[in-house]
Image (spheres, grey):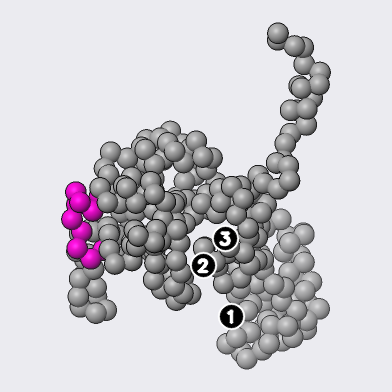
């Protein structure tokens, strides 16, 4: 920017800054979105260092891409749960999907958080330092009982190799984040699922399937532990629910015009 105008960027008028950014977007060898964003970020840092308000120099806001999450079908989810050889990994995947847990939340489940009588899981201090309760399926409870009897965990539901906590000087024996990620990725590969599956995909799938099964959006918000309803509303764009499920015109075309096979 200094080379372009032959002066310090802090000496420029607002119109010059806007013209320069417009030049980057439209005329200067069509730079990538990433290049443009980093230019704006760099100018914001300059304004911060120099004590200049960004709106005084007309810097635009940068919005992230509006992408919808990947969601598995119920058939794919069934294959994923049954893919692992280890019971531990089957239960882990069942808990991630069946309770809509984040990765850290699944690692932080303690035996005392499981209430089989009331059929709920107490999610302690999830994202935003919020507690919540989520239902436990009877199917998951049976698997959890079998897993606990076989593995004998003492505090954490899922144990891993003890790692020293550098901040506190103690040891963290919970299943590692990499371990959880590996279990999900390996199961997806074994199940032959070609979608890009990660741990959070199971949370997206949980939310979408609940909407499709008839759950209302406000209850879903509480079960997911969302601070804002706006975060939950994205699943309305994915779920195939409502008075009539979305369909393709090809379905009615074939139903109306295709020759009968009888």
Sequence-earlier tag: 3 or 2: 3
Query: Distance from label 3 to label 2 (Cα)?
Result: 8 Å
Numbered badge on residue 127? none
Give me the residue at 27% from left, 63% from top: 111
Q: Number of numbered discs present?
A: 3
Give me the residue at 69% from left, 72% from top: 61
Question: Does residue 133 appear left or right of residue 26 in this picture?
Answer: left
64 vs 82, nearest the viewer: 82
Q: Is residue 119 above or below residue 229?
A: above
Q: Crowdedness of circle 1 by 10 Å Cα count: few (<14), some, many (20+)?
A: some
Res 106 → quadrant: bottom left
179 vs 251, nearest the viewer: 251
Range drawn in magenta: 147-156
The reply to whether the magenta stretch includes residue 92 is: no
The nearer-to-camera label among 3 and 2 is 3
| Callout 1: SS | helix
User: Residue 212 in the image: x percent, y percent?
Assistant: 61, 47
User: Residue 140 in the image: x percent, y percent?
Assistant: 37, 49
User: Which residue in the structure is indicated by mark 3?
Assistant: 220
| Callout 2: SS | loop
Given the current orientation, which residue lies at the most extreme top position? 262
Sequence-earlier tag: 1 or 2: 1
The N terminus - image quarter:
bottom right
The answer to whether one can see residue 194 in this image is no
User: Which residue in the structure is indicated by mark 2?
Assistant: 225
183 vs 244, nearest the viewer: 244
Question: Does residue 207 appear left or right of residue 96 in this picture?
Answer: right
The C terminus - image quarter:
top right
Give me the residue at 75% from left, 79% from top: 58
Query: Distance from label 1 to label 3 (Cα)?
Result: 39 Å
User: Which residue in the structure is indicated by mark 1?
Assistant: 45
């Amino acid at each position: 920017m200094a080379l372009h105008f032959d002066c310090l960027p802090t000496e420029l008028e607002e119109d010059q800054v806007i013209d320069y950014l417009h030049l980057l977007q439209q005329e200067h060898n069509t730079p990538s979105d990433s290049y443009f964003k980093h230019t704006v970020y760099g100018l914001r840092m300059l304004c911060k260092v120099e004590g200049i308000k960004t709106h005084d120099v007309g810097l635009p806001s940068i919005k992230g891409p509006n992408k919808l999450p990947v969601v598995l079908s119920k058939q794919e989810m069934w294959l994923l749960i049954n893919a692992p050889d280890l019971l531990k990994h089957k239960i882990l995947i069942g808990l991630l999907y069946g309770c809509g847990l984040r990765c850290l939340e699944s690692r932080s489940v303690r035996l005392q958080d499981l209430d089989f009588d009331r059929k709920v899981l107490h999610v302690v201090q999830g994202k935003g330092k919020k507690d919540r309760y989520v239902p436990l399926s009877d199917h998951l409870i049976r698997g959890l009982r079998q897993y606990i009897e076989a593995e004998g965990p003492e505090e954490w539901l899922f144990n891993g190799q003890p790692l020293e906590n550098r901040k506190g000087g103690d040891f963290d024996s919970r299943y590692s984040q990499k371990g959880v990620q590996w279990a999900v990725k390996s199961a997806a590969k074994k199940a032959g699922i070609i979608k890009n599956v990660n741990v959070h995909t199971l949370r997206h799938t949980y939310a979408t399937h609940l909407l499709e099964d008839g759950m209302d959006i406000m209850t879903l918000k509480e079960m997911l532990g969302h601070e804002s309803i706006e975060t939950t509303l994205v699943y309305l764009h994915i779920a195939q629910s409502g008075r009539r499920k979305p369909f393709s015109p090809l379905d009615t075309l074939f139903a109306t015009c295709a020759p009968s096979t009888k």
